[in-house]
Image (spheres, grey):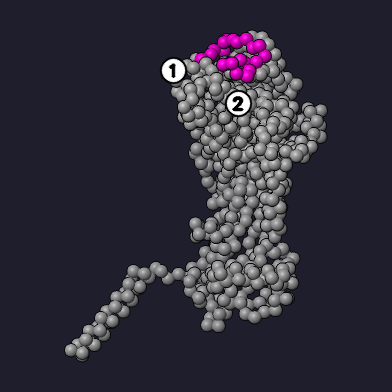
Amino acid sequence: MRRLLLFSLIVFTGIVFIGRLSYLQIYKADSYSLYDDNAIRPVYDYPKRGFVYDRNGKLLVSNQPSYDVMVIPREVEPLDTVEFCELLKIDKERFIKTYKKARRYSPRLPSVFVSHLSKEDYAVLQEKMRKFRGFYIQKRSLRQYETSIGANVLGFIAEANRSIIKKNPYYKLGDLIGKQGVELSYENELRGTKGIKFIQKDRFNRDIGAYKGGALDTIPEPGKDITISIDSDLQEYGELLMQNKRGGIVAIEPKSGEILSLVSAPSYNPNLLVGRARSRNYTRLNNDTISRPLIDRGLLRMHEPGSPFKALVALAALQEHAITPETTIYCSGAYNYGGRRPMGCHCGTGRRNLIKGIEQSCNSYFANAFRKTIDMYDKPTKGMDVWSEHIKSFGLGNYLGYDLPIGKKGNIPDGDYYNKWYPGFRWGATTVISNAIGQGEVLVTPIQLANMTAAIANRGFYYTPHIIKDIKGDAIDRKFTEPKYTSIDKAFFEPVIQGLHDVYNKGTASFLKVPGIDICGKTGTAENFTKIDSVRTQLTDHSIFIAFAPKDNPKIAIAVFVENGYYGARWAGRITSLMIEKYLKREVTLKYMEKMVLEKSLEEEYAKPYSGKPFRINY
């Protein structure tokens, strides 16, 4: 019996071993990886990252050589740390900290020990690398910005963190990846594909040559060059005009949706985020909680649109037949409703039709138009829903779907919004009348304002705003070439556009005319409140302006926002006229206006006690 038990145990053990070996060789044969073989060292060959050009073919971003010192912890042998640290220009404390970090990542896989050596440091170190076992130098390329502008548009590259590496196995520790701007949006196109060489090692851990004669090695594929839609001359001019001011400028080509300029002020030189000083400079920029140069105000700054919004209020009212272009009201200098405090108006007194109402920015006219639109329906909830859908058809209240990695939705309220806001209260059009003049609960970003302006310029449609113009060897996303139509009939745009044209000819922006260019525009002044010691305090108004030109066959639509810039025409309006002339004429003749803007600083405004508080981004 014992003999039979022993025999059975031996047979069972043999079957288990045979089964396990069969499973490993037949079903799990693919589990073997060269990357896990201790006798093979993978070495990556990094590709040239794609260049970035502006719409006129001007080179904005290229590459420069860089050298990283890599470490494989298990191969490190005792070394003269003092000499090594002197060569790398680091202290012993950092040496120990970096080595421990690399070992925690992987004892047998390479990781970056010191990055971004200069050519001079590389030349000195290369001669002595044989003395430091376990360390080697890997060549790669860094970005070289051929311009000092457009940091918010171009973005930057930095090391991929562990979260990115975990999500995407293409990236390894020390790999560079696009962060912000087009570097992030078009990372897959710009980065190319890494090549790899497998180096065979002997039993003494010495390199003895290419594994299998290099049969498994691959060569790197360079990244694709891209052309972006930005006009770098216009971008540079916009950043110049916005010196010593805070705000944003967004200019769009109406017929294509291409973004011509995306200015965020204050900004920074993109070259600050290149090389070994990148981390230190990024920390300094990020810690500037007053100027906040890393925030793209053109995409993230949400604010009340003010009077430019009246153009959409008019279009919604026309579409719902609540008014006609000939509808007139008498303005007494204020709009009185429901026994409440009157809504003041700065247009004087007299009768106003639609065109005159836009020209003079009459609050009373648009309060009436808004109220009539809502009151077309039995219930204000339904009226607000209809009104909201018309406004949203211009791209407001939602992400526009552009190809930059950040943005805000803004807010366009509907009936349900106010049902929640006023539970158990019979609200109506007069309750929310502030929406009629672009205040109340309406919030927009500058890029949404610019896109809204492009849709008006096109008489009822727009293209999704985008920064890409061309990808070498590839096509851009089809969504950027397909028009999106608003809910407003084309015929209703003409009287509104005529009113916007009169704003420049004889209205609130008549002193901003540009010789030889027919411009349609609208001034805007947004109230600016904050809390100081728990008290709601009114600050200096924000200056807003929208415009497009020429009136017929428009080539540029633009929105300008200047924080604490007083009334709309004062600074935003002047900047708008200068930008339009610069783009259409390629020169500026309004020298007196240019001088005024360039010499004006709002730093005193921002230096007031309340201005030290962070502005509202509405995250």
Please determine whether, in this image, residue 570 is positioned above or below residue 466. above
Magenta region's main secondary structure? Answer: loop
Question: In which quarter of the view is residue 22 placed?
Answer: bottom left
In the displayed orientation, state which residue is furthest to the bottom. Answer: 3
Position of residue 372 in the picture relative to residue 283 (left or right): left
> Label 1 amino acid?
Asp
The location of residue 333, given as percent across then percent down, is 67, 14
The location of residue 341, given as percent across then percent down, is 63, 19
Residue that badge 2 annotates: 438
For the magenta stretch, what is the residue range? Answer: 322-342
Total marks in image = 2
- Residue pictured at 50% horizontal, 57% vertical: 168
Please determine whether, in this image, residue 354 is positioned above or below residue 524. above
Residue that badge 1 annotates: 378
Under tag 1, what secondary structure? loop
- The alpha-carbon separation of the residues under discs 2 and 1 comes to 24 Å
The location of residue 77, given as percent across then percent down, is 62, 80
> Label 2 amino acid?
Gly
Q: Residue 425 bears which disc, if any?
A: none
The location of residue 315, given as percent across then percent down, is 55, 20
Image quarter in which the N terminus is found = bottom left
Question: In which quarter of the view is residue 382 placed?
Answer: top left
Under tag 2, what secondary structure? loop
Image quarter in which the C terminus is found = top right
